[in-house]
Amino acid sequence: MTRPVGTCCVVLHTHLPWLAHHGAWPVGEEWLHQAWATSYLPVVGLLERLAAEGRREVLTLGVTPVLAAQLDNPYLLEQFHTWLGFWQVRAEGLAGRDPGPYEFAAATRALSTFESRWRHGGSPMLRGLADSGVVELLGGPATHPFQPLLDERVARFSLDVGLADAALRLGRKPDGVWAPECGYAPGLEELYADAGVQRFLVDGPTLLGAGASTADAWTVGSSDVVAFGRDLDVTYRVWSPRKGYPGGPWYRDFHTFDHGSGFRPARVTSTRTPPHEKAPYDPERARAALDHDVEDFVTTVRARLVDLAAQRDGRPGLVVVAYDTELFGHWWHEGPVFLERVLRRLPEAGVRLTTLRGAVADGHVAGRVDPGPGSWGSGKDWRVWEGSQVQDLVAENSLVQKRLLDVVDSQRQPADGRRPELDQLARDALLGLSSDWAFMVTKDSAAAYARARAGGHHRDFHALAKAIDAGRGRPVALRQRASDGPFGHLDARLL
């Protein structure tokens, strides 16, 4: 093996909002089933293969508490099992016609993997990866809220609920988090420190704007909490708002959908080709394109690290690349194979792979930094979550937080017991505060669904708050929890 020229941390962020009992198609539970089948099963599978080979500290895997809750949910496990069976049957019905045989093989593999490995939920799978040491698992706030816009009490509560949830599912409390949307506001590091969090991610421009390099990690403010920043020049080789490997002409096209079969039969062809003119997908040509793109990415990472060492008098640098896990398989069909090949090829090319935890242990923390506000959204600021298109959601979220605290503060809570209605009130508030709703509205991605979801959680919250004030909150809470009941351990007394 070539002597390492520097360090690369690959970070995956695994997240979908709470979808159980909230629609099926085209968004809703179908969204989860597709991501589960095409991203979560193969990505966990490739990490298990690396673990079996004795590989350690290969990748940092963030799994949001709200997604982890869905991967363990009995109702969703049953629904996903049924969905996989329908996938296989639909593909079998296309025998002799493309893409029937290809889809049938994929569905059969997924169904076998689920029945043999995943039938009891996602937590045993994730805990196995963490116990093997092949990954570092990151936690986060309960429902993936945009933390800079939260009341401090609510922000602390959401983080505590999320970290406690991970400890219950995985047997350990994460000491690193994925900051939702890489959102940062000065002082957030103090909240992390108080919760026992030691490291988190920001986007590259958040560090660069403070005069710090993404080639190092940095302690933030007066805390000992370490921030890592994405190297966008390298990260964007894979995917960016305008370019990246998945847009290559030979890869399977995500957006061209055959509604008769339920499958995606076309290749990208070109970004200008209308759906009805796209060429058929050719798996062999896609594999050849993948060979080229894997080598391009590995070469890019190595060249970046060689340049950093030259600029730093030989001192090895750090490259952090971070992506949504759902890119690998769900959005980019060939993504899991790309990821596995990259994780194998980088060490062969002289690049040391490690986790965020490993990078700290190896001395990649360079000093202190005081970043300004930032995110990984458009403009690298907060506009996606507080811009003009979502001002009504911002106002309602603020109202919900204030009323939550007012109700909790005004209600007597027994020291030795919980109030289920107050727990559900907090749960409703957290579900409504998910950052996904504003993102989807701003980006006009299933915006009507996002507004309906945010509005529904807000209505449930206010209806329950009114019932609590009238002394009849418990039956209302029990009805709501039947469909919106993640985080059974959530205790409103912590507010």
Image: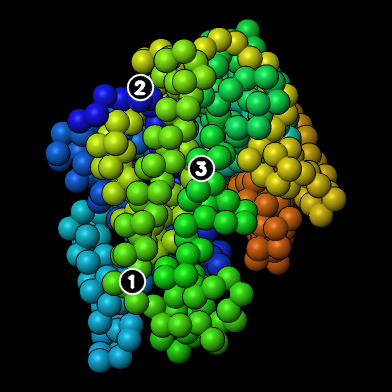
Q: CA distance from mark 2 to mark 1?
A: 37 Å
| Left or right of 184 in this view: 360 | left
- Disc 2 or disc 1, which is closer to the eye? 1
* Residue 380 in view in this figure: yes
Residue placed at 60% from the left, 11% from the top?
A: 368
**Crowd rating for badge 3 (residues with CA inside 10 Å; few <14, some 14–19, many 20+):** some
Q: Amino acid at mark 1?
A: Arg
**Crowd rating for badge 2 (residues with CA inside 10 Å; few <14, some 14–19, many 20+):** some
On the rendered image, what quadrant is the N terminus found in? top left
* Res 361 → quadrant: top left
| Picture mark count | 3
Q: Amino acid at mark 2?
A: Gly
- Give the vertical position of 293 relative to 395 (above or below): below
- Disc 3 or disc 2, which is closer to the eye? 3
- Which callout, 3 or 1, points at the residue further toward the start of the chain? 3
Report x, y in % for residue 108. 22, 71
Secondary structure under tag 1 reads helix
- Which callout, 3 or 2, points at the residue further toward the start of the chain? 3
Secondary structure under tag 2 reads helix
* Residue 170 in view in this figure: no
Nearer to the camera, 492 or 375? 375
Report which residue position mark 3 lands on.
235
Nearer to the camera, 67 or 2? 2
Secondary structure under tag 3 reads helix
User: Is there CB contact under 8 Å for labels 2 and 1?
Assistant: no
- Give the vertical position of 25 relative to 372 (above or below): below
Report which residue position mark 2 lands on.
358
Name the outermost residue toward the left. 53
Q: Amino acid at mark 3?
A: Thr
Circle on res. 285: 1
